[in-house]
Image (cartoon, rainbow, N blue to C red):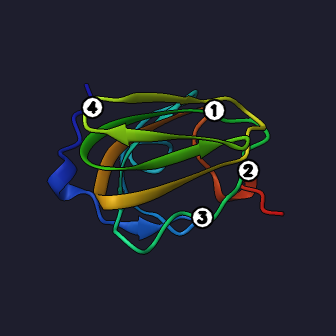
Amino acid sequence: MTINPLSAQKPFTTKDGSAIRSILDRTNAPVANQSLAEAVVPVGKPTERHYHKLSEEFYFILEGTGAMEIDGETREVTSGDAILIPPGAWHQIIASQTLRFLCCCAPPYSHEDTYFA
């Protein structure tokens, strides 16, 4: 059995500029096909617009408000919203109030699968 407390996970900055704490991934559990992380995007520091060739992502907004842009379509997001980001979709999230959300990736997140213009 693997149980990883969020409080025990050290934050790091992803290639797109968001601060995350890996909850379950290849670095801290016997995970093969997905990853789960908590991400924080403060006001004035949006993620850099990017895409992943392989990973499908889910964001689940826990706190805050902002705007999610996927392939040129922008929608307002708030706590309780679940967002699907398909592989290959350009995306960026911008906080109007600091955003804290869960990010699930399949296959697991990797810097090598993050691409910029």
Q: Tag 3 or tag 2, which sits nearer the N-term?
A: 3
Quarter location, residue 59: top left
Identified at 53% across, 31% down, the residue is: 34
Q: Tag 3 or tag 4, which sits nearer the N-term?
A: 4
**Contact flag, marks 1 and 3 (Cβ < 8 Å):** no
**Left or right of 116 on screen, residue 96:** left
> Of circles 2 and 3, which is in front?
3
Q: Tag 4 or tag 2, which sits nearer the N-term?
A: 4
Q: Which residue has dot 1 on it?
A: 107
Q: How far across and how far down the image is residue 65, in percent?
A: 31, 49
> Of circles 4 and 1, which is in front?
1
Identified at 25% across, 25% down, the residue is: 1
At label 2, the amino acid type is Asp
In whole angstroms, how far apart are the C-alphas of marks 1 and 3? 17 Å
In whole angstroms, how far apart are the C-alphas of marks 2 and 1? 10 Å
Q: Which residue has dot 4 on it?
A: 2
Most foreground residue, 32 or 52: 52
Please determine whether, in this image, residue 60 is positioned above or below residue 69: above
**Contact flag, marks 2 and 1 (Cβ < 8 Å):** yes
Q: How far across and how far down the image is residue 20, in percent?
A: 39, 59
